[in-house]
Image (tube, grey):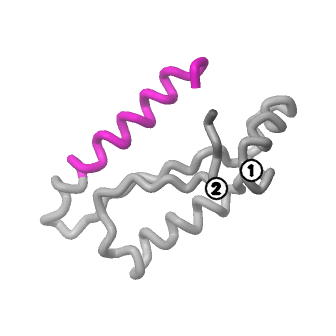
Amino acid sequence: MRDEIAYAASKGALAAITPSLADHFADRGITVNAVNPGPVDTGYAPPAAHEEVRRRFPGGAWGGPDDPARLISWLVGDDGRWVTDQVINSEGGFRRG
């Protein structure tokens, strides 16, 4: 993400602060997790970038908004109540290199 240093730094900051926040809120019964959804097709990418990124997925397709949403729904539901202090990558096998 050479051209998006501020974006990459902010994602790194969220990953770094997740354990501290989880520890801070644990005694209140509050769980803290971070989800890294990777490239999700929300219509923001121009056609050339969209095609370049598409080729980096093993299945040849971007994720949709419902892909990370399902993970988040699970985390905030009863099944995810015991999960805390995690940074979860939900990227569909996206290849950066």
Identify residue for label 1.
62
Whether residue 9 is situated above or below residue 71 in the rendered picture: above
Please tell me in which quadrant of the rendered image residue 97 appears: top right
Task: Report the span colored magenta.
Answer: 1-21
Q: Is residue 27 magenta?
A: no
Please name the amino acid that badge 2 sits on: Gly
Q: Position of residue 1 (x, y in %)?
A: 58, 26
**Residue most extreme to the top:** 3
Dot placed on the residue nearer the N-terminal end, 1 or 2: 1
Identify residue for label 2.
92
Whether residue 35 is situated above or below residue 44 in the rendered picture: below
Question: Which residue sits at x=66%, y=63%?
Answer: 66
> Marks 1 and 2: CB-CB under 8 Å?
yes
Q: Is residue 20 magenta?
A: yes
Measured Cα–Cα span from mark 1 to mark 2? 8 Å
Whether residue 30 is situated above or below residue 87 in the rendered picture: below
Q: Position of residue 35 (x, y in %)?
A: 47, 53
Question: Which residue sits at x=86%, y=33%?
Answer: 47
